[in-house]
Image (cartoon, helix red, strand yellow):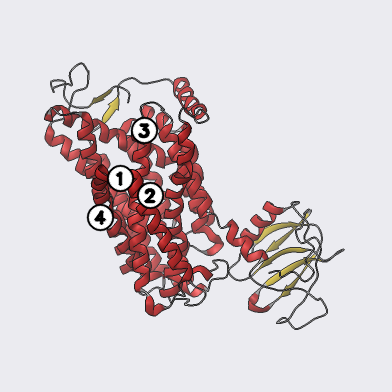
Amino acid sequence: IDPLKSTSPDNQPTIANDTIPIFSIRKIYKNLILLSLSFIILFTAYNGMVTLQSSLNTKNNVGVNSLIITYSFLIFSSIALTGVCMDLFGLKFTIIIGAIGYIFYIAANIKPLPVLMYISAALVGLAAAPLWTAKATYLNQIARYHSQHKNQSHEISVSLFFGIFFALFGTNTIWGNVISYFVLNQSSVAQKINCGVHFDPTSASPTNTTQNVDDTTRYILCGIFTGMGLLSMLLLFLTLDSIALTQKQTMKQLLKKSLEVLLSLKEWKHIDQFFLIPITMWTTIETAFLTAQFTRGFITCLIGIRYVGLVMVCNGIFQALSSYIFGRLVKYTGRIFVFSIAALINYAMIILMFLWEPKSSQMVLLFVIAGFWGIADAIWQTQVIATYTVLYSDTDPSALAKYRLWKAIGFVITYSDLFEYLHKLFVDRGYSFDENNQDNSDINFSIDDAIVQHFSTLVTLHGQTLYKKSPIRQVTLESNTKVFFDQMGDNRILCMTDDSFDSIVVLKTINLFKALVQFHLGALPFT
């Protein structure tokens, strides 16, 4: 890191051959504990909210879409903003400004309008990389002070301080989900059908999601979490001692540094880093699966949203314990062994979820899956980053930027419901159209040009604006499924929707596949 200085008096001792005045041992531990406590409070609120996104904010798929936006912007901030923010604002205020982005996102859930959720999600993505990098730099620096007091190597103090921080920080999953459980305890009725691997988020019953969480409950939950975020920021502002950069750089120098980091991403000094890409993306795919698909398709669907917090508490406990256990075990077994354990656990749980026909009387299996998934997650999250740090940090300055980049891409892929929507559109149901058939329960149709290729005039469906080529008509099928057709020329599908499949998603699907392919459906099942 760049040369640093503290705001301590000039008569404090300094590190040999350096200009850095160091904190007293008491102040070092004070800042370590306060920084850890602030992050626990902030991420108790944020992670508690994130865990509920796929179950709480299902209208227009706002919850999951906001997470996609967050990790899309994280890709940019990981590359371009980290060094700039630390140079401009210093370590302490980079952390505080980053916390503000998280607080905006938590508060936006009080009234989860798409525009508010998406803007606040983008702010989180922009704030996340500078916040976490500034935190790591701050911990590294006070560990450096500590090593001077104890006359020991810097690496020993760094390991100690990061170990203490993450041991404390890891408990945020427990506290956030405990709060969610008690606040949402009477808030939902489970769907209980088509759960598990059969769950389709685009046709889920509304009884198990946001429609059954009343406004008062939402305000209480979001109010508690927002208050915790503000408390965290206030704690940082009032109690954390500043460590400021001594050598300020010009904006031109800062932009040049960001460009150098970006260009370095295409330079692979170690070819074996390519083989770390799949495992790096998996560390986020398995986390995103747990917080998005598992919480909604298994927990919320089977036993209700009120149990999401309780099941995830089990996950948090096992994750915290496993982080400590495997952190010590890896010194004796090596990382390949613990990676193998994590992979076997994931495979076992995936097979269990695939074969299990969920029943509410078997809810104990949800705790088993969440607990074992927490063990595997602890291994992936701690040991993959350690692999990058140990092998490449000294020889490849962009190694950690690449790590954050692939993690963000993994999140974006997993949180996207694209493949679920394709499954919904082309596989699940077998409806077809015969315009002379008035019985909606048994409709057959033959349609050419299933994807509309051009839109010229505006129409509005469900309050959303779409473009179409010519006037449309609507046919309602069973289960409230609606099909909108062109009325001129050959019948062509404009879009299909039901109560849970909103027109925003339909518009997204049309845009993705417009002018891609012509479908001659005939007897082919189509939804």
Q: Quadrant of the C terminus?
A: bottom right
Query: Which residue bears the numbered disc 3?
Result: 391
Mark 1 vs 3, N-terminal side: 1
Cα separation, mark 4 vs mark 1, equals 28 Å
Badge 1 density bin: few <14, some 14–19, many ≥20, Cα 10 Å: many
Picture residue at 21% right of the left edge, 29% below the top:
154
Q: Where is 526 relative to 386, above or below?
A: below
Q: Is residue 420 visible?
A: yes
Label 4 secondary element: helix
Residue at the location (61% across, 61% down)? 421
**Is 441 situated left or right of 103 in this image?**
right
Q: Residue 190 at what x, y percent from top left?
A: 44, 76
- Are circles 1 and 3 on residues that touch, CB within 8 Å? no
Q: Which residue is mark 1?
A: 233
**What is the quadrant of residue 33 in the picture?**
top left
Q: Which residue is mark 2?
A: 103
Q: Provide residue 72's location: percent of width, then percent of height.
A: 51, 44
Q: Give the percent coordinates (x, y) of residue 185.
A: 34, 72
> From the viewer's perspective, is the residue at label 2 or at label 3 nearer?
3
Residue labelled with disc 4: 321
In this view, the residue in front, 398 or 95, is 398
Give the structural element (helix, strand or loop) at label 1.
Answer: helix
Q: Position of residue 391 (x, y in %)?
A: 36, 33
